[in-house]
Amino acid sequence: MTVSLTGVLLCAIIALGIVARLAFILAFRVRVLGRVTRHDHHASERRFDARGYEWDGFRDVWLRTTYDYKGVKYRNDVLVVVSAGNEPYPILRLWIDPANPNNVTAKGPAYWCVWLLLLCTFAILSWMLPF
């Protein structure tokens, strides 16, 4: 088995997992709007990131969010990706489990579609390998 075929097969397996995650989110999660009340991305970190020391330009940030679902207020911590040097948006889309509204994520279908697009690009490039 060649390196290019191995790369394509690996990408296909990972793509199946991403498509399964997309289907799961769209079938079993509900979108709500959440309001950020607090975050752990302090001003000193934002100044440090703005100078360009962070190599990839993004940072994982924990946000304390509040949201309403069926008339009940909930408060949870959510992990999001923020571009370096910027403050998180005050309002964001959250995906919750209707059976347990405390089970929340900010990584919805758009996040997984971006990863799927990057994975497909990698699969095409690995297919073009001469060995």
Image: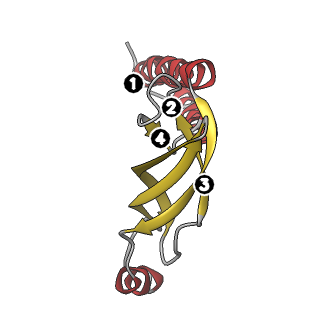
**Badge 2 vs badge 3, beta-carbon distance below 8 Å:** no
- Kindly identify which residue carries mark 2: 126
Dot 2: within a 10 Å radius of its alpha carbon, few (fewer than 14), some, or many (20 or more) residues?
Answer: some
Q: Earlier in the sequence, mark 2 or mark 3?
A: 3
Give how far apart the Cα atoms at labels 1 and 3 are: 41 Å
Q: Nearer the viewer, mark 2 or mark 3?
A: 3
Give the residue type that dot 2 points to.
Ser
Dot 4: within a 10 Å radius of its alpha carbon, few (fewer than 14), some, or many (20 or more) residues?
Answer: some
- Kindly identify which residue carries mark 3: 92
Dot 3: within a 10 Å radius of its alpha carbon, few (fewer than 14), some, or many (20 or more) residues?
Answer: some
The secondary element bearing badge 1 is classed as helix
- Kindly identify which residue carries mark 1: 3
Give the residue type that dot 4 points to.
Thr
Counting from the top left corner in percent of width and height, residue 21 is at: 51, 23
Above-or-below relation of 43 to 63: below
Q: Earlier in the sequence, mark 3 or mark 4?
A: 3
**Badge 2 vs badge 1, beta-carbon distance below 8 Å:** yes
Q: Earlier in the sequence, mark 1 or mark 4?
A: 1
Q: Earlier in the sequence, mark 2 or mark 1?
A: 1
The secondary element bearing badge 4 is classed as strand
What quarter of the picture does the N terminus occupy?
top left
Q: Nearer the viewer, mark 2 or mark 4?
A: 4
Residue at image position (48%, 24%) is 11
